[in-house]
Amino acid sequence: MLFKVLPKTEFLKIVDHLGQARPVIGPVRKGTSRDGRALYDFERLAAPEHLSLEATTTIHSAKRFFLPHRETLCRFKLEGRGFEKLAGDDHPVSQVVVGLHPCDINALNRLDKVLSAPPYPDHRYLARRRSSFLIGLGCMPEPHCFCRSMGTHSAWHGFDLFLTDLGEEYFAEILSAAAFELLQGFQCREAAHADHEKYKAAAAAREKRFTARVETTDLAKILDMEFESPAWEEWGKKCFSCGSCASACPTCYCYGVREEISLDFASAVKEKILYSCNLVDFAEVAGGHNFRKDPATRLKYRYYHKHRGFLERFEEPLCVGCGRCGLVCLAGITVPRVIASVRGREEGHA
Ligand code: SF4
Ligand code: SF4
């Protein structure tokens, strides 16, 4: 990895330059929440000045630019006595995504693992991922952030360039040849020892700001022991089965497939729609049998997938500790609270 120092004024020029060739996606301000919190979300930028680099946790992650909530897999057209298969949606493949926090980059790294795994790799996702240019940005933890507990508060790979705020300048970590070549055309300098020291001081100050915490020691084993814990029933009673948590989550990837034939039978469409295991009919099968009828079972399944099943298969949990599910949940269900109660503790804050 190479380290350079980049004046902040130069960075907007870089964004402007990148935007001339391909779409740029980044956090933009979306108003204020009812409790006074500034709201941001990832959007395609109309102009570089719309970029809000001060953004805290965005409402959604940038997942939908790699894994859209709804996507047409293919279309069919009646041709003679049979159907002709046509191509599906062609979402922009080559894009620039700016302002990804470490948890968001690590979330994409987790998705890479599962969506590239045989026997059914997601070629659309992988094409977008391979041809995107990613610029990460250091952040300050908010009260809901527990990425430090999940080991995802720092990103080692899965981006091209990563910037850390050093006041008037950014400390730039260069990971790809594309990022190295890009910076050749802009004013920046090699990082010196003093810059390394400033970076380390900024990282140490950030470490002290984490307050939310999830105890992950032996968590997978404890989940096995606590499969019948009354805590699941208690949280299940609160859950509205709305699916908002999965919609906001940067790592949820479960989907359903819907096929629709037009009334005149002249055409048909096959769509992939992101789905949530908290939704009532997630485990319903033909004939109407539902394998997870009650909210407690569905909520428990989501936690076991994130903190046990994925870990067993890929050696790391599927939760990156961004806290988004807790922010959107009207029932006040948060990962630190649920895990603490399953462990028999009161709450999940330091
Ligand atoms: S946990 Fe919260 S956000 Fe998720 S489905 Fe239940 S009520 Fe909705
Ligand atoms: S489960 Fe919640 S905290 Fe974990 S990655 Fe998903 S939204 Fe973030």
Image: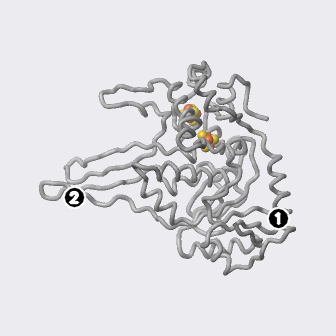
Q: Nearer the viewer, residue 344 or 249?
A: 344
Q: Residue 346: percent from the left, percent from the top? A: 73, 25
Indicate which disc, 1 or 2, sits on the residue closer to the N terminus: 2
Q: Looking at the figure, which quarter contains the N terminus?
A: bottom right
Query: Quarter-wise, where is residue 183 in the image?
Result: bottom right
Foreground tag (1 vs 2): 1
Residue 104, compared with residue 301, is above or below; it is: below
> Is the Cβ of the residue at disc 1 closer than 8 Å to that at disc 2?
no
The label number, if any, that marks residue 196 in the structure image:
1
Secondary element under disc 1, as helix, strand or loop, is: helix
Residue 191, compared with residue 204, is above or below; it is: below
User: Pointer 2: what residue?
Assistant: 84
Residue depicted at 56% across the width and 19% down the height: 228
Secondary element under disc 2, as helix, strand or loop, is: strand
The label number, if any, that marks residue 315 in the structure image:
none
Q: Amino acid at mark 1?
A: His
Q: Nearer the viewer, residue 192 or 15?
A: 192
Q: Amino acid at mark 2?
A: Glu
